[in-house]
Amino acid sequence: MLVTDGKPVWIRSNKGLVQAGFFMFLVRKGGRRKLTGKEMEWPRRNRVDYRSGDERIIEIELERLRDFKNHPFRIADDEQMQELIESIKYFGILNPLIVRPLPEGVYEVISGHRRKYAADRLGYRKVPVVIRVMSDEEAVIGMVDANLQRAAIHPSERAFAIKMRYEAMRRLPGRKKGGQDDQKIKGIRTVQILGKEIGDSPKQVQRYLKITELIPELLELLDNRKISFNPAYEVAFLKRNEQKELLEAMRYLQSTPSLSQAQRIKALSQEGTLNLETIKIILSEIKKGSINRVMFKNEQLYQFFPRDYTAEQMKQEILEILKSWMNSGQDKGRGAGRRNETDETERDQTGTDGIHGTDEGAE
């Protein structure tokens, strides 16, 4: 439970936002009390709530809000969106949008694109917002941080969000951390700091940065889990025309590269010897994971072989037995085929005579 110094905290029960008829409390310094009827109307009323410092919640018309420029996160009208719409329909927008003012007299959304979309679907004219003055770099970092916490994010969305944050961090001249002196965040240090802040290793950050170099069609395959992340990372090293040739080969063969195949394709590209036919040959190979294996324990086989036989000896014996069995089966098949041909000839002859006989009898 969040306890603030003299500010209301709304508690969500298992029935949703607690309102009149449910147990709802206002937490204040020194204790708690039940809300009055007037205070229960607070979420649905048009009022200002003062935040830390000079921040406050106000309501702004939707037409004055602008989506973040090059926003990397897609807004899908999926089941989660329908749940959000239903929540806002009954309880209103509990968490205000974060926006920043633009010179044109409008506001750019930093956090809350999905809430804005849901409110628009419900016919809202205004939404609650917190206005913050931010530089371009601070806005990018704030937007990315707000969205990376979402549970369902496509790999391409995460990749481009990380790239935007990385580039914004590199543009910053420096920043203070924990009261210490400004730290320069250029080059590899930017990757290290970024990885720590978003919960990824520096290597993983670099891999996501590379993923952004895939052509849109391959990014779509990655998001749809038609190609795995590790092969996609290797493919990102190919030139754009080579990626298009790979895509053509994948569609032609109805196959996607494994990690080892992607690494070989990448190596040929770096050598300058990669072409469409080579890609097709590599993709036509049987993948290691596609090979089925039949395995026996030695104890199972020793029922049929002497105990002093080695595994290799048993293997050779089994292969010889299978070859002999296969050959005998083919011989039996050929013999059966010859007998069937003879029987069919005899039946044809008998059937023809029978028919002639019947016809002659009828005449």
Image (tube, helix red, strand yellow):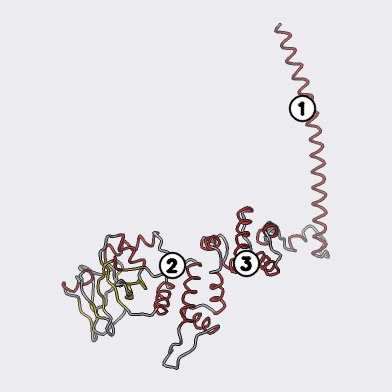
Instruction: Tell me, for residue 185, which label it has, or none.
Output: none
Q: What is the three-letter code of the residue carrying label 1? A: Glu
Q: What is the three-letter code of the residue carrying label 2? A: Phe
Q: Are marks 2 and 3 in contact (CB under 8 Å)?
A: no
Q: Quadrant of residue 138?
A: bottom left
Q: What is the three-letter code of the residue carrying label 3? A: Leu
**Mark 2 vs 1, N-terminal side:** 2
**Mark 3 vs 1, N-terminal side:** 3
* Along the viewing direction, whichever of 349 and 102 lies nearer the viewer: 102
Residue 253 lies left or right of residue 205; in this view the side is right
Q: Quadrant of residue 37?
A: bottom left
Residue 97 lies left or right of residue 333; in this view the side is left
Q: Are marks 2 and 1 in contact (CB under 8 Å)?
A: no
**CA gap, disc 3 and disc 1:** 62 Å
Read off the residue under disc 1. 344
Q: Residue at x 78, y 31 (%)?
A: 340
Q: Where's the N terminus, which quadrant?
A: bottom left
Q: Nearer the viewer, mark 2 or mark 3?
A: 3
Question: How many numbered marks have been drawn onto this rendered protein structure?
Answer: 3
The local crowd at label 2, few if under 14, some if 14 to 19, many if 20 or more residues have their Cα within 10 Å, is some
**Mark 2 vs 3, N-terminal side:** 2
Residue at the outermost front position:
104
Q: Nearer the viewer, mark 3 or mark 1?
A: 3
Residue 200 lies left or right of residue 75; in this view the side is right
SS of the residue under disc 2: loop
Read off the residue under disc 3. 238
Instruction: Tell me, for residue 73, which label it has, or none.
Output: 2
Q: Where does residue 136 sit, x and y in percent of width and height?
A: 40, 78
**CA gap, disc 2 and disc 1:** 71 Å
Q: Where does residue 151 sit, x and y in percent of width and height?
A: 44, 69
The local crowd at label 3, few if under 14, some if 14 to 19, many if 20 or more residues have their Cα within 10 Å, is many
Q: Where does residue 237 sit, x and y in percent of width and height?
A: 61, 69
